[in-house]
Amino acid sequence: MITIRNISFCYPDGNRALNNVTIDVQKGSNVAVVGANGAGKSTLLALIVGLHNLMEGQIEIDGKAVGKGTLEEIRKKVGFVFQNPDDQLFMARVYDDITFGPRNFGYPPEKIKELADNALEIMKIGHLKDRAPHKLSGGEKRNVAIAAVLAMAPDVLLLDEPSSYLDPKSRRNFILAMEQLPHTKLIATHDLDLVLDLCDRVIIMNRGEVVADGAPRELFLNEKLMECSGLELPLSLQTRK
Ligand SMILES: Nc1ncnc2c1ncn2[C@@H]1O[C@H](COP(=O)(O)OP(=O)(O)OP(=O)(O)O)[C@@H](O)[C@H]1O
Ligand SMILES: [Mg+2]
């Protein structure tokens, strides 16, 4: 579903964020991307939805190359939940943010309502729908941002730090919701316990490169790999040691 071939990327100030990254993500799978601060996770997700111009390599979504001519189509297929919800929520009312995508796609009113109500229900935030997004708590904003992307009914979900700001109950709700949703998911996160609960595969990045790709439990128990990548053993594996 997502094919990333030998991509490299430098920011305009010369900062090299990604170096020769190749990743394939199968349809319907839940794949995590982990790595220390600055490893390149957010840059990778942003490139998949064409938020930066790719310099080297190729990215394809369901066989369609990401590029200037295909961005509209790609963004209909791929929903991106930003690391910072303030980058994503800009309407005066939560409900308007959640219906923004489907309205933009030109869907009829009944379909817009159905998609929005379904997204509110999945994220359990019906009670927030008339509130002003910028006056919500960090976790409430995060749930609204996820719902706004779900309402666009994408095939692929790119989630950047989705569990940050969430309290334990919301985090559990998020994990259960993601387990039930059929979307192909690529999740950048520091929450390695979430990876163990939700993902069948994890990609470890370090300084812009993929350094490992495999089963979460197996990779997380590899002490040398974890240390070299600036990662720490998740809590659930520590207690069982
Ligand atoms: N707008 C920018 N301009 C220049 N360099 C940037 C910019 N955004 C990110 N970088 C650099 O690119 C590299 C990768 O950053 P990125 O945000 O992708 O990391 P990350 O893995 O998502 O980190 P975090 O865990 O802190 O979210 C870092 O060295 C960072 O300093
Ligand atoms: Mg990031």
Image (tube, helix red, strand yellow):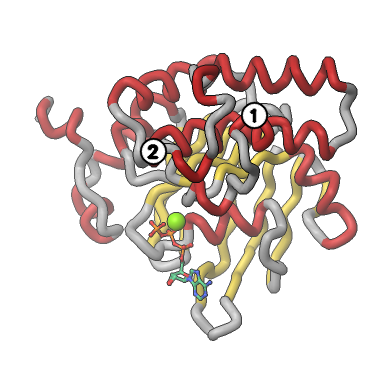
The answer to whether the residues at label 1 and label 2 have Cβ atoms under 8 Å apart is no
Q: How many marks?
A: 2
Find residue 143 and name its label.
none
Q: Residue at x 62, y 48 (%)?
A: 90
Q: Residue at x 60, y 70 (%)?
A: 8
Percent x, y of residue 69: 89, 58
Q: Dot 1: within a 10 Å radius of its alpha carbon, few (fewer than 14), some, or many (20 or more) residues? A: many
In the rendered image, which residue does mark 2 sit on? 137
Question: Is residue 79 visible to us here?
Answer: yes
Side (left or right) of 78 relative to 177: right
Task: First in sequence, mark 1 or 2: give its number.
Answer: 1
88 is higher (above) or lower (below) than 240? below
Question: Is residue 213 visible to us here?
Answer: no
Q: Residue at x 64, y 29 (%)?
A: 95
Give the camera-side residue of 72 and 196.
Answer: 72
Q: CA distance from mark 1 to mark 2?
A: 16 Å
In the rendered image, which residue does mark 1 sit on? 95
Percent x, y of residue 49: 69, 52
Q: What amino acid is found at the position of numbered circle 1 in the picture?
A: Tyr
Give the camera-side residue of 160 and 229.
Answer: 160
Residue at the farthest bottom position: 13
Side (left or right) of 101 relative to 126: right
SS at mark 1 in the image: helix
204 is higher (above) or lower (below) than 108? below
